[in-house]
Amino acid sequence: KWCRAFPGLPEQVAEARHFVAALLEEWGCVDEGALVAGELAANAVRHSLSGKVGGWFLVVVGFGADFVRIEVIDQGGDSAPTMRDATSLEEGGRGLMLVAACAKDWGAKTLPQGSSVWADLVREGV
């Protein structure tokens, strides 16, 4: 497993994507991994206490035999992460739908002082 903490700032979402992409270069799912990391990190910054002054989020990348798990742990918020239907007029609301489309499986769990959202990506060529 690899992990890295990021300040809860919008510009750190790109840094989280780069971190994950660098780790996945040999796995072949770089684009999907960067997209998933970016969406999960953006949600942490936008929808949790991680985006408040002094906030942070943690990106964890774990490798299995035929999959990679990308997890973002945030500082929690008013509601649990959920996938919802976004109308065509809304600017946001499609992040977890993109994550679900890329992932073999994904989920969210509430932690004692935050929440975790994870996605498993299939290793290409396996």
Image (cartoon, rainbow, N blue to C red):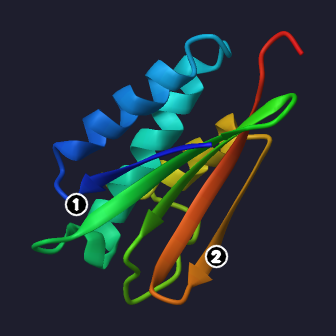
Identify which amino acid the numbered label 2 is placed on: Lys
Give how far across and how far down residue 107 sits, in percent.
Answer: 69, 63
Q: Name the residue under label 1.
A: 8
Residue 94 tag number: none
In the rendered image, which quarter is residue 16 located in?
Answer: top left
| 58 w.r.t. 11: above or below | below
**In the figure, is residue 105 to the left or right of 82?**
right
Residue 109 tag number: 2
Can residue 92 be seen in the rendering of this structure? no
Q: Mark 2 vs mark 1: which is more N-terminal?
A: 1
Q: Which residue lies furthest to the left in this view?
A: 53
Give how far across and how far down residue 61 sits, in percent.
Answer: 58, 42
Instruction: Determine the CA span between mark 2 and mark 1.
Output: 19 Å
Identify which amino acid the numbered label 1 is placed on: Gly
| 47 w.r.t. 86: above or below | below
Residue at 47% across, 64% down: 73
Q: Which residue lies furthest to the front in this view?
A: 1
Can residue 102 be seen in the rendering of this structure? yes
Residue at 21% across, 70% down: 55
In this view of the protein, which residue sits in the foreground, 126 or 23?
A: 23
| 63 w.r.t. 92: above or below | above
Q: Is mark 2 on a helix, strand or loop?
A: strand
Residue at 16% across, 55% down: 9
In the rendered image, which quarter is residue 19 located in?
Answer: top left
Disc 2 residue crowd, few under 14, some 14–19, many 20+, Cα 10 Å? few
Give how far across and how far down residue 15 sits, in percent.
Answer: 28, 35
In this view of the protein, which residue sits in the foreground, 11 or 63?
A: 63
Give the quadrant of the C terminus.
top right
| 56 w.r.t. 113: above or below | above
Disc 1 residue crowd, few under 14, some 14–19, many 20+, Cα 10 Å? many
